[in-house]
Amino acid sequence: MKNLFALLLVSALLGCSTTHLIEVDFPAPLVPALPVEARGVFSEEFSNYRFEQTEDDRSDMTVILGEAHTDLFRTIFVVIFDNYTEAGEAASGLTLQPELLAFQYALPGETGSNFYEVWLRYRLQVRSGEQQVADWQLSGYGRAANETMQTQGAGVNGATEEALRDIGTQLAIGFAQQTDIQAWLREQNP
Amino acid sequence: MAPLRSISILLGLLLGTGCSSVTIDQMRLSDTSIDIDNETVVVLGRQHSAAYEAERDLVNCVASELSFGTSGMQVIAEEEFVNQLYPWFEPRTAPLSLERFGMLLKNGMLQEAIDQYAIRYIIWIEGATERVDSSGGLSCSITAAGGGCLGMGIWEDEGSYEASIWDFQEMQESGRISADSRGTSYMPAVIVPIPLLAMVQTDTCRGLGKQIQNFIVSG
């Protein structure tokens, strides 16, 4: 009986903390490439990012996002630039460095809805040599229905995938439309 | 043994016997036809607004209904279509009108990718099934001597969907089909809970799927 009580206690304590590894396959975007040489820079902090929820009034939760969002930016960069690399220094062209500014989530019931929801905010710094070309902030939103027999991990993964796809959509379509980027492109091909 | 078997059969008959009704309305805007062997359709859920977000299960179910039977069509899976055409059919970018869709197709890459699927009709579904009422109560307990439940739960679900059928070849809207459904489920429990579920979403899917298939084929 004592053993059973100990097992239940351990299970309950373990149940208070969850870790979710975000695993997503991003499709390559169907957009034309810019005739530009570009280099992506992913900081250690960005590539290994994990969100840790430790607020007292919510269950502890860790979301491992680093690999998924690095994959997303890489997938988009590879397609939207004619010549993309992550090695060395870009002799000419653009250097792109994304940074995650905010990760927020809501679980079903917390907002009165039956959805897992995720909000992401990124900052993309674009430089050409020492010159800052653009400093762009992107916000993404995703949600996933709380389905019967679904685990919390699947719900959080689904909502995060949608939010990342939303960021990818803006990046793929919007990059070349940014005023600062357009101005820089005109400077390169006067 | 015989009484036990009778109870099992009774329980089996009772399962899934919650009541539901589906009302289908149709509005035809132009003639339709399809070459089942050489043309395809795709069923997509509207995701642009939380209020109209069609459940993925329902969208897949309607797609499955369309591919079934003697008039079964070749249906492109929503996930494959949306991924191949990423990012043009995302909640933020999916065309809400044929005019907007026509503008998107000026992007040659998109036009070429869609052409590979030989799509004749794009079917957009929007709507949702919601729980509109619930009453009663059910309590379960476990003791050293055993466990059981007692009570009665009742809930009512309501679904409202609209399918908009776009003719990709003629670049016009062929028609709209709406489905409104309502169903009441019961869960009486004397020791064992017995779910009498109204399959509102499934019934809506079947009704909507059959009607869309008939709409396209009967021209």
Image: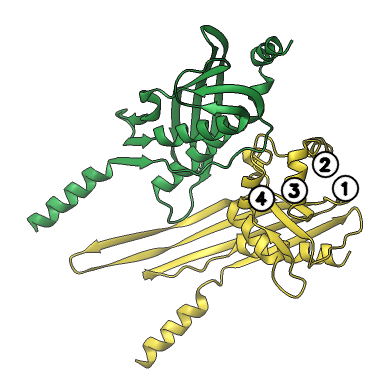
Q: Residues within 10 Å of mark 3 (few under 14, many from 20)?
A: some
Does label 2 or label 3 sit earlier along the sequence? 2
- Helix or strand or loop: what does disc 3 sit on? helix
Relative to residue A80, is residue A178 depicted above or below? above
User: Which subunit holds the residue at mark 1?
Assistant: B
**Alpha carbon distance from label 1 to label 2:** 7 Å
Does label 4 or label 3 sit earlier along the sequence? 4
Chain that the image shows in yellow: B
Type of the residue with mark 4: Phe
**Alpha carbon distance from label 4 to label 2:** 18 Å
- Label ID, residue B114: 3
Q: Are marks 3 and 1 in contact (CB under 8 Å)?
A: no
Q: Where does residue B38 sit, x and y in percent of width and height? A: 79, 64
Is the residue at mark 4 from the same chain as the one at mark 3?
Answer: yes
Relative to residue B139, is residue A173 depicted above or below? above
Q: Residue furthest left?
A: A2
Q: Where does residue A19 sit, x and y in percent of width and height? A: 32, 40
User: Which subunit holds the residue at mark 2?
Assistant: B
Circle 1 residue: B172
Tag in front: 4 or 2: 4
Circle 2 residue: B98
Circle 4 residue: B81
Q: Where does residue B204 sit, x and y in percent of width and height? A: 67, 61
- Helix or strand or loop: what does disc 4 sit on? helix
> Seen in the image, is B99 located left or right of residue B10?
right
